[in-house]
Every structure is written in structure tokens, then in C-alpha cells.
């Protein structure tokens, strides 16, 4: 097992159990405790975990951007609910953009019953998911791939996204706040997402219930740029009232 793969597995354990123990990890991966300590040192330096006596605990800071293979195991049922709701908003022949979030992969799966869609994306995982779909036009943005994220970013990605005009931009986020707006953990990802918003008619934000009242590192947009919010649980009445006043439709499973 490669060191990167082992560290991602450690992050998965942290996501599930909130803490890990050096001895347990050494036995699980059949490596020395010193190797595990080096892994935990690396995760601590990257801000993904916090070392503690004999192990580590998870870093729950909302500004931390976890690798794709770790994020995809979070709130799977919630992402499936969001994906089904978003699929109901997409019509045959639509031109849409999909961001490189793990939620976007579930959205891509849910859209496979549609016909003649054009999908513009900077997500490698979305492109793989849609590689067997017949009759669609799947367009890659181009750009530079960041290790562990399966996303294309940078000036080329922004340029590639900006070359097309879409009917609907569909994206996820890490923070959704009344004052700070829609935020994410990485500026490079935000640049690409802003390009998607700038080059589409309708803006759909997929945000699970844990992201409300949360602020991440980098701003994507203000709330007034959002047309539709799709979430996995009914927000509280204060949120629903505010969204209604702003003219933002809020969709959730019980709606």
C-alpha cells in the first residue's frame, strides 16, 4: 500500500470514529508504529488531523479540504436525496455545469435517465461516471489536477468553463451562511465555481444540512446569486422565511 493511500485510509477511520490509535493502525496496515507516527505527523502538518497522545483526533475545521476519496464516504444517503431532487430540475437537452464535489458524482448518476444532456465539468470522477452514457455531450474544462482531489483547477480550467454558456450551474459548497454567503475550502476550486455561475442562467446549490450556518475559507458568491437551494433535511423556519424573502427556492425531501 502506498503511503498516500494509507494516509487516506487513516482519514477515513478518523471520519468514522473521530480518533485513531497508533497501535491499532499499525496492526490494521501491518506496518511499524513509527511509520504510522510519520503518517500522523504528515496529516497534522497538513491540518487534516490533530496529533494526540498515542494517536490522533479529527480536525473538524470547516476550512479544511479533505481528499475526494475521504469526502465521498460522508453523508451518502443525504447526497443521494439531494441528487434525486436536482435530477427533477433537469430537462432533456439541458446544458449544465457540474463541479468536482462528491455530491456531483451522485447527481451525475441520478441524471443518467435523461436524454441529450451537455455536461461541462472540471471533475475527473464525473467524467468517469458519465463515460458510458450514450447520446450526451460531456465536455472537460481542462486544467491542472491537484493530488488527491480528482479536480481540474487553475487558469485553464476557468478558461475552459468560461468558453461555454449553460442553462444551469449545479455545485456544492462547504459553507452556507446568511452573512458570508456560499463558501468553500479552496480558492482554486472557488475560481472554477464562480466561472460556472458567471456563465449560466440558473444557479443551483446543493448543500446538506450540516453546511447551514457554516463559513469556509473562500467565498464563492453572495446569497443573492442563488436561485435554488437543494438540501437533504428541512431547514428551520428562520432559514425558510429568509430564503422565501430573498426569492430563493428551497427544496428538501419532505417538501
Image (tube, rainbow, N blue to C red):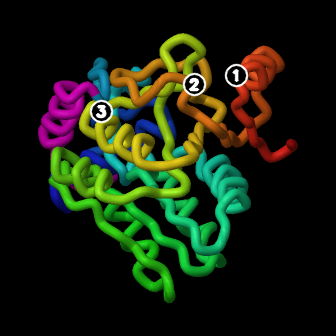
Label ID, residue 45:
none
| Residue beneath the point at 80% across and 19% down | 241
x and y, in percent, of residue 5 in the image: 24, 55
Give the residue number, with chain letter if any, for mark 2: 224
User: Which quadrant of the structure image shows residue 38?
Assistant: top left
In this orientation, does residue 24 appear?
no
Q: Earlier in the sequence, mark 1 or mark 3?
A: 3
At 33% from the left and 50% from the top, the residue drawn is 9
Report helix, strand or loop for mark 3.
loop
Classified by dominant secondary structure, the portion drawn in magenta counts as helix
* Residue 37, placed above or below residue 100: above
Count the marks: how many?
Answer: 3
Closer to the camera: disc 1 or disc 3?
Answer: 1
SS of the residue under disc 2: helix
Q: Are marks 1 and 2 in contact (CB under 8 Å)?
A: yes
The span from disc 2 to disc 3 (Cα, nearest Å) is 21 Å
Residue 161 shows in this picture: yes
* Lower position in the chain sequence, tag 2 or tag 3: 3
Residue 236 in which image quadrant: top right
Residue 172 sits inside the magenta stretch: no
> Mark 1 highlights which residue?
246
Q: Distance of mark 1 from mark 3, alpha carbons?
A: 27 Å
**Dot 1: element:** helix
Q: Residues within 10 Å of mark 2 (few under 14, many from 20)?
A: few
Which residue position holds label 3?
A: 186
Q: Nearer the viewer, residue 245 or 83?
A: 245
Q: Relative to residue 221, is residue 112 drawn left or right?
A: right
Q: Which stretch is magenta? A: 27-47
Q: Quadrant of residue 221?
A: top left
Real-space Cα distance between discs 1 and 2? 7 Å
Residue 193 vs residue 115: left or right? left
Residue in the image at 59% along x and 15% along y: 178
Amino acid at each position: 500500500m502506498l503511503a498516500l493511500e494509507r494516509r487516506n485510509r487513516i482519514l477515513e477511520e478518523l471520519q468514522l470514529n473521530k480518533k485513531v490509535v497508533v497501535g491499532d493502525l499499525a496492526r490494521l496496515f501491518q506496518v511499524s508504529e513509527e511509520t504510522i507516527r510519520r503518517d500522523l505527523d504528515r496529516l497534522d502538518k497538513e491540518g487534516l488531523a490533530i496529533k494526540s497522545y498515542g494517536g490522533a483526533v479529527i480536525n473538524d475545521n470547516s476550512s479544511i479540504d479533505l481528499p475526494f476519496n475521504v469526502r465521498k464516504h460522508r453523508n451518502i444517503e443525504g447526497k443521494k436525496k439531494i441528487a434525486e431532487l436536482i435530477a427533477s430540475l433537469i430537462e432533456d437537452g439541458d446544458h449544465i455545469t457540474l463541479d468536482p464535489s462528491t455530491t456531483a458524482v451522485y447527481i451525475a448518476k441520478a441524471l443518467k435517465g435523461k436524454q441529450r444532456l451537455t455536461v461541462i465539468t472540471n471533475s475527473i470522477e464525473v467524467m468517469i461516471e458519465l463515460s458510458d452514457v450514450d447520446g450526451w455531450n460531456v465536455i472537460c474544462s481542462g486544467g491542472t489536477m491537484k493530488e488527491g482531489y480528482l479536480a481540474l483547477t487553475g487558469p485553464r480550467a476557468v478558461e475552459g468553463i468560461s468558453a461555454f454558456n449553460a442553462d444551469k450551474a449545479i455545485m456544492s459548497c462547504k459553507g452556507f451562511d446568511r452573512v458570508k454567503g456560499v463558501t468553500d475550502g479552496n480558492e482554486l476550486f472557488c475560481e472554477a465555481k464562480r466561472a460556472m455561475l458567471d456563465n449560466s442562467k440558473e444557479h443551483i446549490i446543493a448543500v446538506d444540512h450540516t453546511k447551514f450556518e457554516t463559513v469556509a475559507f473562500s467565498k464563492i458568491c453572495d446569497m443573492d446569486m442563488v436561485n435554488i437551494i437543494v438540501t437533504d433535511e428541512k431547514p428551520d423556519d428562520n432559514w425558510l422565511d429568509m430564503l422565501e424573502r430573498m426569492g430563493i427556492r428551497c427544496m428538501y425531501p419532505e417538501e
